[in-house]
Image: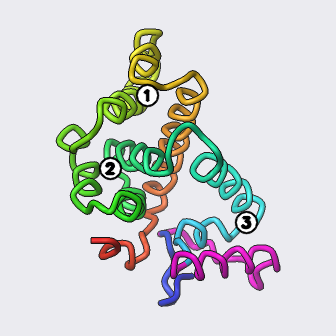
Amino acid sequence: MTEDGQSPTALDLPMVAPLPEATAKYFAICEDKLGLVPNVLRAYAFDIAKLNAFTALYNDLMLADSGLTKLEREMIAVAVSSLNRCWYCQVAHGAAVRELSGDPVLGEALVMNWRVADLSPRQRAMLAFAEKLTLASARIEEADRQALRDAGFGDRDIWDIAAVAGFFNMTNRVASATAMQPNPEYHGAHR
């Protein structure tokens, strides 16, 4: 349940109670650093093993060392989520783009149509690849990877772009299927 007693999804899957000590500590860290516990975490908390698997992969892809900046990874999250029309991720990761970039216009542009955003050639190549991976993954070919190399990405970076885009394609579908609701605080954050 969220702070207001509402379920974070349309499914009747209550959080484990009491939360295991490690999970309660993780939620407290979120509250301290973010000012909230993201509803996606609350949604997964009906099964602590699933929550731990989700957070381990998310934290690895979005926060671990990478040739991609945190902002670039959030940009991929928003562009993919926009293509998939995922309400939760557009709102939550749009707020992260606004925070990391200091630019509320960038967050809005990525949600609406990343092509209108003021982006570098590197970022355009990255988002074009993420878009193709989202809409027609079987059509990715060497020319698509080469376009990323030409924009300055190494092969490890290409892996990371694909992994982040792939992760959000999966999570977008789960969020949409369960009517996951973004935390209200995201809507006005960093504007």
Horizontal and vertical percent position of residue 118: 21, 43
Kind of residue at badge 2: Arg
**Numbered circle sitting on residue 47:** 3
**Neighbours of disc 3 within 10 Å: few (<14), some (14-19), many (20+):** few
Residue extending farthest top: 142
Residues marked 3 and 2 touching at CB (< 8 Å): no
Q: Quadrant of the C terminus?
A: bottom left
Pointers 1 and 2 in contact (C-beta within 8 Å): no
Q: Quick one: label 2, few (<14), some, or many (20+) residues within 10 Å?
A: some
N-terminal-most mark, 1 or 3: 3
Secondary structure state at the residue bearing disc 3: loop
Circle 2 residue: 85
Nearest the viewer among 11 and 30 is 30
Whether residue 31 is in magenta: the answer is: yes
> Which mark is nearer the camera, 1 or 3?
1
The residue type indicated by label 1 comes to Leu
Counting from the top left corner in percent of width and height, residue 124 is at 31, 32
Residue 120, quarter of picture: top left
Q: Could you say which disc has been placed on residue 133 in the image? A: 1
Q: Which residues are magenta?
A: 10-36
Q: CA gap, disc 1 to disc 2?
A: 15 Å
Label 1 or label 2, whichever comes before in sequence order? 2
In the picture provided, is 165 more to the left or to the right than 147? right
Distance of mark 3 from mark 2, alpha carbons? 26 Å
The residue lying at 58 percent from left, 68 percent from top is: 43
Mark number, residue 165? none
Q: Quadrant of residue 98?
A: bottom left
- On-image quarter of the N terminus: bottom right
Residue 188 coordinates in the image, percent (x, y) = 30, 76
